[in-house]
Every structure is written in C-alpha cells, then in structure tokens.
Image (spheres, rainbow, N blue to C red):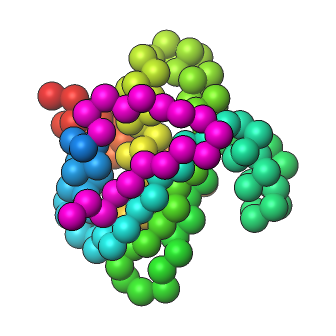
Amino acid sequence: MSKVFFHYADRKLNIPNKRNIQQFVEQIFKKEKKQLNHIDYIFCSDDYLLNININHLQHDYYTDIITFELSSTNKTEAEIYISLDRVKENAQQLNEPFNKEVLRVIFHGALHLCGYKDKTKKDAELMRQMENRYLAFYLK
C-alpha cells in the first residue's frame, strides 16, 4: 500500500507517472535510511500557501514549498504543501521544464523530512546536490 499521496487544494495538476513518483519518494526514504509512515503532498496556489506561511510560520512571503513533520516518533508522517504558481515561475526563470521542476520540489520536500536543510549556503548546496542526484536517477 502506498505511503505517498497527492491531493489538490485550489490547483489541479496532471501528474504523469504518478505511481512511479510515489514509489520513488518511498525509495528516497529507504536510501536515506529514514522510516516513512505517510506523506500527503498538497498542491495549491501562491495565495493558499502564503496564508499557511503567515498563519503557521509567521512568514509574510511567497514560497514554493512548506513541509510539516507531524509525527513525534521516528516514523515520518508529514504534509507537504507545494505552490504550483511558484513552481511554474521558478521553472520559467531557471529555463527548466515545468514537470522537472515539480519533481525537484517533490524530492526537496522528501529530503527535508530525511534531515536535509537549506537555511545556510552550505546546507543549500548539499540540498541541491541531493535533489540533482535523485532527479538524475529518476529521469534515467
């Protein structure tokens, strides 16, 4: 039974190979030696995610992803909110295909839950390396 689920708040996303992506996220947890119980990815708009950012994190700015670890045990249970508006804009700015940028952000959220951070320059570089590694492996 799947442990990774995709939901839609106020934005719909046609996800090609959805089942493969869900299974790959589970594989990331295995490779990173982190136990996974359940992840809900919720795709939404900039405004939807901004509201969460303001109300739950007291941050008044747009972001592409917010990850909430909900479990107090070592088995990950999480909600990951992804702004498709922000992902689309990032893809355009980076001259990347939208679907590839969606994958990057999905993997980014999983990596946060596996313990990777991105607040410092050094941490952000490592996070990007791991995103690129998993993207390359997935896109083979």
Residue at 20 percent of width and 55 percent of height? 27
Q: Does the magenta stretch include residue 108?
A: no
Q: Does the magenta stretch include residue 12?
A: yes
Residue 115 falls left or right of residue 135: right
Left or right: where 29 falls relative to 72? left
Residue at (37% x, 32% y) in the render:
15
User: Magenta segment, which residues?
Assistant: 1-18
Q: Where is residue 6 in the image (x, y as percent from the top left)?
A: 42, 49
Looking at the picture, tell me which residue is in the foreground, 131 or 58.
58
Image quadrant containing the C terminus = top left
In this view, the residue farthest toward the left is 140
Q: Which of 128 and 30 is in front in this view?
A: 30
Asked if residue 64 is positioned above or below residue 112 in the image, the reply reads above
Residue 102 visible within the image: yes
Residue at 34% from the left image edge and 46% from the top image edge: 130
* Relative height, residue 10 to residue 1 (above, below): above
Corner quadrant of residue 64: top right
Q: Where is residue 44 in the image (x, y as percent from the top left)?
A: 62, 41
